[in-house]
Image (cartoon, rainbow, N blue to C red):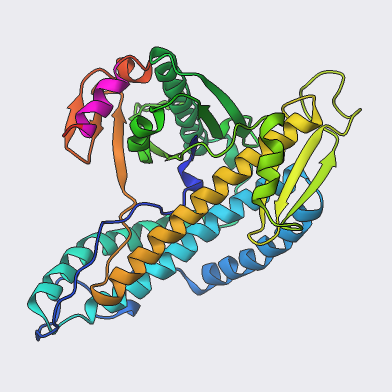
Amino acid sequence: MIRIFHQARLRPNLLSGGFCIRPIRFNSTPASFPTSVDDLPSLTKSLVERAETIKKEHKELSEKLSNDYIPDLQIKYDNYTNILGLYDKLNRHRLEYEELVSITDDPDLYREAQEELQTIVPEIEKLVNELRVKLEPPVKYAEKGVGGNEASLFTADLLNMYLNFASEMKWKHRIISEGSNAGGFLNEAILCIDTLGSYDIMRHESGVHRVQRIPETETKGRVHTSTAAVVVLPKLSEGNESSLKEDERVFAPGEVRIDTMRASGKGGQHVNTTDSAVRLVHIPTGLIVTQQDERSQPLNKAKAFAVLRSRLAQMEQEQEMQRQKNLRLDQVSSTDRSDKIKTYNFKENRVTDHRINYSLHDLPGVLSGKKLGQLIDVYRYK
């Protein structure tokens, strides 16, 4: 199961492997970085207060949405989730920075700390700049701009690329769900590929994908950079009525609340006449999944359970990675490694896999799915 979504919703999920145990002894102070966290780029007091206010509103929205699905509130909730993800990441990085600059007693650990600082200081500056924009009061019609929509267009490009690749490979596949923003642009999609061996190939696509191109609405010819995240998980459910009973048995009684409601939006005469839409609320985590694509309530319910299991598996995967990171941080200190894995540069007609520093100069071939397998194989058999 492949989940593709706007990078704004991305949560960190890639870490450097392993950890090491070394004695600590060295006496030096890093000269090329601020010696105090107070000297780092930071948010103003008013923006911090704004972030804390959003935290409270986010909790209130979560409670409202757990009882009733309101599209406008869901959009606001998703936006706040994005902002708080960046805010929490900034606070984690600042704590990691304090730990890194305190490592002075061992030559090896000191050198590792300096390498980590080379990454974490620019990351802190980047997060502060992003949050300064996102925490400012919204400008009227700001959502009409290129930035967010360009990332959504890239998300759609990636979805089409994987659909084309699945067709090229003659894999059985289907779209489980698609989500759009207020402007109608795609910001998330879940694609299910149901062929033995496909997961072993597609798992290498998991990570951050970056696009560099000139948007159609750009009048000065400037190249814009946007990102989207791809999460690849083994399929846990068929997502149909036959698998529904098995899906429900995975959860303890009372763990998932099931609400039914009338579908809204496009869909024909059945819209607002039957309670075909289904919303699942996972009580322990607060995860909410809504499905209304199908006319049949049981089928919407089955698809919702499939999506819920996928998202819970993703959450468990991220928690395990964070646990491993914390183990390493306790002994060495590190920074988040969820960096881009690929760049799609339209001007240079290339796709670059940064993990192996390999570029393929046939971007249309990759996006059409015809050359994606070649790119994946270079990484798989490196």
- For the record, the magenta segment spans 371-380
Q: Which of the pair 40/229 is nearer the observer?
A: 229
Q: In this view, does 329 lie above or below 190?
A: below
Instruction: Please name the residue shown 62% across and 36% down the image.
Output: 181
Considering the whole magenta stretch, tell me its main secondary structure: helix
Indicate whether residue 284 is drawn in magenta.
Answer: no
Magenta stretch encompasses residue 376: yes
Q: In this view, does 140 lie to the left or right of 281?
A: left
Residue at the spot x=63%, y=60% of the render?
285
Q: Where is residue 132 in the image (x, y as percent from the top left)?
A: 47, 59
**Camera-side residue of 275 and 173:** 173
Left or right relative to 138: residue 298: right
Which residue is at 81% across, 46% downward? 259
| Quadrant position of residue 124 | bottom left
Task: Relative to 109, say whether 244 is above or below.
Answer: above
In the rendered image, residue 139, in percent from the top left (x then y), is placed at 60, 48
- Work out whether residue 220 can be spotted: yes
Location of the C terminus (image quadrant): top left
**Can I make out residue 223 in this image?**
no
17 or 213: nearer the viewer = 17
Q: Is residue 204 above or below residue 18?
A: above
In the image, residue 10 sits, relative to residue 155, either above or below, namely below
Q: Which is nearer the eye, 280 or 302?
A: 302
